[in-house]
Structures are given as C-alpha cells and as structure tokens.
Amino acid sequence: GEIRSIYLIKTTTRTGAYIMAAAATAVTSDSTVKMYTQKGARLVWLTKKQLPATVKPGDRYDATIEKDALTIKFSDTGKNKVYGKKTKDGKDPVLAIKGKQLSDAFGIDSDGIIEHIPVKTNGKTMVIAR
C-alpha cells in the first residue's frame, strides 16, 4: 500500500539521549485482500470494504478455485450465501471462504501468516490471484 503519512516521534532514553523515529501509517490499497492461515488451512475473509458496493447480505455467489486463483461470481443462482454481520447501522455483508481446496490452490503457510493477494473486481466478479 501507499504511505499516507509519516509521524516523527521524539523520545528520550534512560541516558538522556534523544531518539528520532519515523512511524509510517500505510494504507492498504483496495487492490489486495488478506489470505490467512488458521488451524492449518487457508482462509479468505471479505467484508464490506473489499466487496463490490452492490453486494448485500443474503446475496448469492459461486466460488471457483484453481491454482493460485479464487474467482467469486455474484448471481441470483449462486450456491453460496453472503452472510450479514450486525453493525450499529444494520447489517454489513461478510463472505468467508476456507477449506482444503483453497489450501491446495494457494499452499499453506504457518498459522498466523497473513498474505496480501491482488484482487481485481469487474462488476459482479472478483478474481483473487497471485
């Protein structure tokens, strides 16, 4: 992601020496999604931020998994359902995809590793691919 701002932090050590440190706040671009490894399996968790603006809780989708690629197509006849997460404003769409097929397609990292994978959204189709 791009760096939006840099903060300069001035602090003093026990010996009285000044230290200047730069802390950058990076903004993750919309063009990547996070793929987690949890309990030895891969997991993609998509929220309102990553999903197309038109996707609502209750919508349906199909997911196709191939080597290093996950394709999500939103349609009225999709096999899977977009879930809703309660928020103070109502419900936000949430989509989680996990399992052996995803692990086989993207390989498994050690638990706790988060990989940023490019995503392209075109209308009702999202392609998450290396």
Image: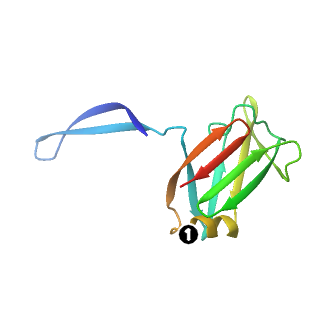
The quadrant in which residue 91 appears is top right
Task: Give whichever of 60, 85 is nearer the camera.
Answer: 60
Q: In the rendered view, would you say 120 is above or below 35?
A: above
Q: Residue at x 65, y 51 (%)?
A: 45
Find residue 37 and report its image quarter.
Answer: bottom right
Amino acid type of the residue tagged 1 in the rendering? Ile
Vertical side of 91 occupied by 99: above or below? below
| Residue sitting at x 34%, y 37% | 24
Left or right, 100 with reference to 57: left
* Residue drawn at (85%, 49%) of the image: 78
Instruction: Look at the picture and state if 66 lies above or below 49.
Output: below
Q: How many marks?
A: 1
Q: Quadrant of the N terminus?
A: top left
Q: Position of residue 21 (x, y in %)?
A: 23, 40
Task: Please name whichever residue, 21 or 44, is drawn nearer the observer in this view of the structure.
Answer: 44
Residue sitting nearer the eye, 83 or 78: 78
* Residue 48 picture location, percent across and down: 67, 37
User: Which residue is labeled 1 in the image?
Assistant: 108
Quadrant of residue 50 within the rendered picture: top right
Residue 35 spot, x, y in % from top left? 57, 55
- Of 26 and 15, nearer the camera is 26
Secondary structure state at the residue bearing disc 1: loop
**Mark 1 packing: few (<14 Cα in 10 Å), some, or many (20+)?**
some
- Residue 106, percent from left and from top: 58, 64
* Side (left or right) of 70 relative to 83: left
